[in-house]
Image (cartoon, rainbow, N blue to C red):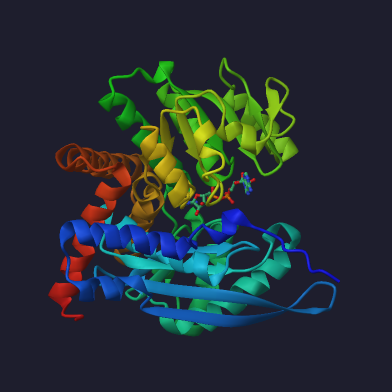
Amino acid sequence: MAIQEVSTPEQSDTPSPSESVVTTMVESADRLRLDREVVDLLRTSWRELHAQLPVRMSDGKLRIFEGYRVQHNGARGPYKGGIRYHPKADLDEVKALAMLMTYKSALMDLPFGGAKGGVMCDPMRMTEHELNILTRTFTDHISMILGVNRDIPAPDMGTNAQTMAWMMDAYGQRYGYTPGIVTGKPVELGGSFGRDQATGRGVSTCMREYARMERSNPGDIRIAVQGYGNVGSWSCRIANGMGFKVVAVSDVKGGLHNPDGIDIAALDKWFAVAGSVAGFPDAIPITNDDLLKIECDYLVPAAVGEVLTAANAPAVKARVVIEAANHPVTPSADAVFAARKIVVLPDILVNAGGVTVSYFEWTQNIQQFRWSLERVNGELESRMTAAFNELATRVAQDGTRHRQAAFDIAVQRVATAIKLRGFI
Ligand code: NAD
């Protein structure tokens, strides 16, 4: 019997997420003429912890989950990065995200290194009790490499403030009360005001600054946002408040299009009941694929990674792609955008609002002090604006693309810290 060959072209010629980040870093190192030894150090992680997580599920059966904590580089400070609960949160993805955290913190000039964690699970299909037990088991298994001055987790896809509360409690049971061990906690447990909206506020600040730079009026700019979770929904709310017109949104269940602008307050009311944007009456239903190709000015992928590929990039109609999600544009799509002169504002700048307010939360916890929401938002906006302007100046000076310039700034800072510390 003949065995049929199954071809998967998108997979075979697409580098893995961690290979893509390494390629971008090496290209930066070449432009910066960095020492090869620094490059070799940055190619791999400092430490990768793989843990087996047995959980007795509500039906009495034992399930063994896999979890990871990857610490990429800590030359600039304690490791920092979120914990992702997702069926596809495999080791390679977590490694790539840990590397991006190193460069994101460096670009924002935060005193942190880069880390990421992941558990391969589907939180949508688990009970609250199962998630609580899984989170405590995971925390116990990685606690020996965590610490307020060592490694500070935060939420990411599939995790939230409640997950961080369980992590803080599990860590505290072993080591004593330590609120600064995680960020993105509930405000009642030492979380910072403004952390929930921070990433979306950072995304919107980038939009506002880009519009200012190109001398456009936000009211004339149509934005399309994929993903209506934490990042996507706050980006829509805050950008809409700045005057931008949100013409399309989507989530995993489907999307909506209204060329005249979607009423975000009404959509939020719909979402609160329906649990999805799908079915919102005052718009035309579209698929997630349609959303990426919709008529708009700024396209904001704010859901999962690798959604813009060589296959759909030629059909994108936006002038600017604003990477709110981590790694939403594959390298081959990036090349298509470069050829089509579509600007891509990179994830390590655009979604850095989250880690920036995590930094504020960590400093507040260390000082046992609380900032007002106004102070958090004001400091965040001024740091995002400064980083945006530094990047724009570098792009203008060097004639590079935004991702290249962002990596050039970040990789140089990390390399300098590595040398000063005497790692090599
Ligand atoms: P979330 O879980 O709150 O929301 C994710 C959204 O994406 C949901 O609306 C979901 O329905 C949608 N979605 C999931 N799979 C999809 C698919 N295949 N197609 C279309 N939509 C899909 O997650 P989040 O915290 O908003 O994170 C979104 C992205 O932003 C991730 O890439 C994450 O790594 C990145 N990010 C988040 C933060 C943060 O502070 N939350 C910070 C930096 C980066």
Give the image location of residue 411, x and y in percent.
24, 60
Give the image location of residue 359, x and y in percent.
33, 58
* Residue drawn where x is 65% and y is 28% of the image: 256
Q: Quadrant of residue 52?
A: bottom right
Q: Residue furthest front?
A: 2
Give the image location of residue 315, x and y in percent.
54, 32
Give the image location of residue 224, x and y in percent.
53, 30
Q: Quadrant of residue 144?
A: bottom left
Above or below, comparing residue 103 to residue 37 in the picture: above
Nearer-the-camera pick, 179 or 27: 27
Taking 127 as reference, is 164 left or right? Answer: left
Nearer-the-camera pick, 21 or 55: 21
Quarter of the image with the C terminus in it: bottom left
Taking 402 as reference, is 175 left or right? Answer: right
* Residue drawn where x is 42% and y is 17% of the image: 219
* Residue drawn where x is 37% and y is 50% of the image: 352
Quarter of the image with the N terminus in it: bottom right
